[in-house]
Image: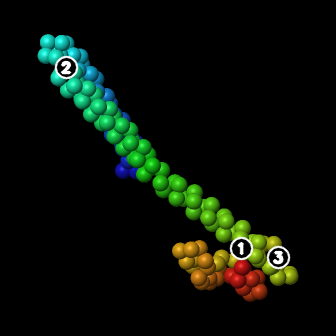
């Protein structure tokens, strides 16, 4: 099953749970109406029971809404993480470009691929050249930056 199909199934399950909860609320309200009629005969105790049922149903509806929001947040988490990773890599690239002193004679088309090992705090712990530009002075300048 694809990720989109899985998400659609989860959303449909959530919608069905919400529909079931609404059916339960309607049934409970009908029951409360019947109890209200009989409460006139029985007194206030039936009204207290009916009020308690309403509170329980409201709490159940709130829980379903919360579960729906949590499911949406979990579904969207990978996308938010990918966006954060792209933003972070963009910040790293800007910082490197600001610190980079390009040696004289290096063409604009020069390209080097450097792997960085970062600490949890974001400090560079190690760097190594994965793909050289063929210009050792440029490669080393990029690695140092």
First in sequence: mark 1 vs mark 3: 1
Give the residue drawn at x 22%, y 21%.
47
The residue labelled by disc 2 is 44
Quadrant the C terminus occupies? bottom right
Residue 141, quarter of picture: bottom right
Give the residue drawn at x 86%, y 82%.
104
- Residue 51's place in the image compared with 60, above or below, is above
- Mark number, residue 85: none
Give x and y (percent) for residue 117: 57, 79
The residue labelled by disc 3 is 107
Considering every residue shown, the one lying at the far left of the view is: 42
Residue 127, quarter of picture: bottom right
Q: Nearer the viewer, mark 1 or mark 3?
A: 1
C-alpha span from label 3 to label 2: 90 Å
Give x and y (percent) for residue 29: 26, 22
- Mark number, residue 96: 1
- Residue 77's place in the image compared with 61, above or below, is below
C-alpha span from label 1 to label 2: 75 Å
Considering every residue shown, the one lying at the far bottom of the view is: 136
First in sequence: mark 1 vs mark 2: 2
């Amino acid at each position: 099953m694809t990720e989109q199909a899985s998400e659609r199934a989860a959303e449909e399950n959530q919608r069905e749970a919400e529909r079931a909860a609404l059916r339960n609320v309607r049934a409970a309200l009908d029951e409360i109406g019947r109890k209200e009629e009989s409460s006139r005969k029985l007194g206030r105790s039936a009204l207290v029971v009916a009020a308690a049922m309403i509170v329980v149903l409201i709490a159940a509806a709130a829980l379903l809404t919360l579960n729906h929001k949590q499911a949406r947040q979990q579904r969207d988490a990978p996308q938010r993480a990918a966006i954060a990773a792209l933003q972070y890599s963009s910040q790293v690239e800007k910082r490197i470009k600001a610190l980079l002193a390009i040696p004289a004679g290096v063409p604009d088309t020069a390209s080097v691929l450097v792997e960085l090992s970062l600490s949890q705090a974001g400090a560079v712990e190690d760097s190594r050249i994965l793909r050289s530009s063929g210009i050792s002075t440029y490669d080393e300048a990029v690695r140092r930056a």
